[in-house]
Amino acid sequence: MGEKRKGNHEYLEYGIHHVAIIMDGNGRWAQTRGKPRLEGHRQGVEAVRLVVKETWDEKIPFLTLYSFSTENWRRPINEVQGLMQIFIEAIDRYAEELYQNQVKVRFIGKKEGFPDHLTERMENLEKLTERNQGLTLNLALNYGGRDEIIRAFQKFLQISLNQGGDIDEDSFRQYLDTGNQPDPDLLIRTGGEKRLSNYLLWQLAYSELYFTDVLWPDFSSRDYHQALADFVSRKRKFGGLG
């Protein structure tokens, strides 16, 4: 990222305000090259940086990346520990760059279960960037869509019992991890699978879905813009008639 944005800035005109991505294929990328799975995750960090830069360049206000799910704790312990270390290294390496480029970082998901030294870095990065007014980057860590809805309902119920009020979508959504952010207009999933994997289940109700066989570490600027262009070619119905 740099001081001057180089994108065409046309995607906002076509209604792209929020992109969500399921970054799939890191392990397979490594295995096809005879490398440890963690090497695929390390390469995936570079793809994250590229997509953040492209989103920033195009002035798309919100980007949400599925980084570690509630189900990922079931992976082998050495892989989980390796992923925690990769998250730490990435924060240490890119925190200042994100701050300088006006990226506001938010971590969504359950704020528990992480090593203390990772939790501290997550909190510090959110605090460092909380006043930034450029791209909002949501990193979904220890995140599950069903878990998010349950946690939101618990908060909503507690406040409603104390304050009263009717239940409606607008009043409920503020208790989701994404708060009052706009729902994703476009979901991209790399790696060839065609499912949501418990990701943003509430927010993706009317999102356009784009699936690509490209493995996440190979996901390029061209691949990203191809997905954005595909969105532009569609007519969104939001449940209405086409």
Image (tube, grey):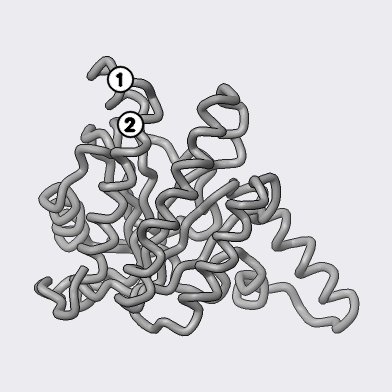
Q: Amino acid at mark 2?
A: Gly
Report which residue position mark 1 lands on: 35
Give neighbour class at mark 2: few <14, some 14-19, many 20+ (Cα, 10 Å). Answer: many
- In terms of image quadrants, where is residue 91? bottom left
**Residue 44 placement (x, y as % from top left):** 31, 41
Q: Nearer the viewer, residue 152 or 107?
A: 107
**Residue 197 placement (x, y as % from top left):** 49, 38
Q: Does residue 163 appear to the left or right of 39 in the view shown?
A: right
Q: Quadrant of the N terminus?
A: bottom left
Report which residue position mark 2 lands on: 40
**Residue 131 placement (x, y as % from top left):** 47, 84
24 w.r.t. 168: above or below:
above
Q: Amino acid at mark 1?
A: Lys
- In terms of image quadrants, where is residue 204? bottom left
Q: Residue at x 85, y 70 (%)?
A: 158
Q: Residue furthest top?
A: 34
Q: Nearer the viewer, residue 126 or 70?
A: 126
Q: Does residue 166 appear to the left or right of 208 in the view shown?
A: right
- Looking at the rendered structure, the secondary structure element under dot 2 is helix
Q: Residue at x 62, y 60 (%)?
A: 120
Q: Does residue 205 appear to the left or right of 229 in the view shown?
A: right
